[in-house]
Amino acid sequence: MARLDLRNDANVAGEWFVDTRCIDCGTCRDIAPQIFGEVHGGSVVTQQPANGDELDAWLAAQACPTTSIGTVSRRPRPGRLYPREIEAGSGVFDLGYCSEDSFGASAWFVRRAEGNVLVDSPRFTEALVAPIAEAGGLAHVVLTHRDDVADARRWAERFEARVWIHADDLVAARFASDVVEGLDDVEIQPGLLAIPVPGHTKGSMVFLLDGRWLFTGDSLAWSHERGDLTAFRGACWYSWSAQMASLARLAERHRFAWVLPGHGARTSGDPDELHDRLVGLVRDRTAQS
């Protein structure tokens, strides 16, 4: 619960606020950029919710890894908000409940006849365990990279799921049952590909589901500020040139209609348009190197 005694003075006046325990993960700004902004290395409310935006504020509050978002009057949450299906009938869900151990990275749940999948790890909480169990549990936990492992072991043990990670990031998840090696795509189950994309970390991967849903970890995201796809040069722990080469290879081999990252905003669009944006990102960022 957000602490009113720690309310950041930079919040605009009004009911909603962010407290000073914020770690500046940016999750709330990605979910509700019309409400939250960054001031002096932390998130604050820059515009009080209006015109039906309050649901977005609640979604950001429930996703916040430090529970730093709340209301002055301590309003009760309007029911269960997560898991939240991101497109009706898709079976792809945002899990909210981000973990401080992954610096607030988003995690995703996919309901599939072939076996349900968890992409990266949210907090291990009964608020998510119960609905995931009701949906049939987990067959696979797939990890995009070492930074977003968080509570993956607890999720895997709870549902006796297989755990996938790349060999070059295995140090973060030695409990993994399945290890991807090299640069070749690996089919985890029919319609679900693990695609190595070294760069952000040496063992970074993205996961492409049914040629439509691309789960990107910290390798690719949407930027509200730029209005375009982006990659995080300032948070590239292994090799920027390798990351650009990885994204170029991704553009050559695959199309997708959704980008669902760990950090950064999600987006959807025409696959050809997103392909062109990815090609342009690689071209422009490589030229700047």
Image (cartoon, rainbow, N blue to C red):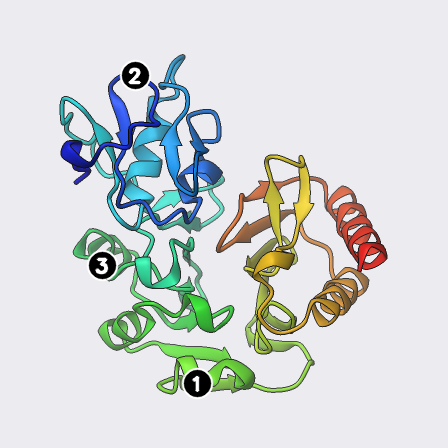
**Tag nearer the camera, 2 or 3:** 2
Q: Looking at the rendering, which quadrant does residue 80 occupy?
A: top left
Q: Nearer the viewer, residue 217 or 102?
A: 102
Residue 18 in percent (x, y) is at 29, 34
**Which residue sits at x=24%, y=62%?**
124
Residue 108 falls left or right of residue 222:
left
Q: Which of the two discs, 1 and 3, labels the residue nearer the N terminus?
A: 3
Q: Which of the two discs, 1 and 2, labels the residue nearer the N terminus?
A: 2
In the picture, the disc for residue 13 is 2
Residue ID for mark 3: 129
Residue 132 in percent (x, y) is at 28, 57
**Tag nearer the camera, 1 or 2:** 2
**Which residue sits at x=54%, y=44%?**
266
Q: Nearer the viewer, residue 109 or 35?
A: 35
Marks 1 and 3 close (CB-CB < 8 Å):
no
Residue 73 in percent (x, y) is at 14, 22
Residue 171 falls left or right of residue 62:
right
Gap in angstroms between the C-alphas marked 2 and 3: 37 Å
**Which residue sits at x=57%, y=72%?**
201
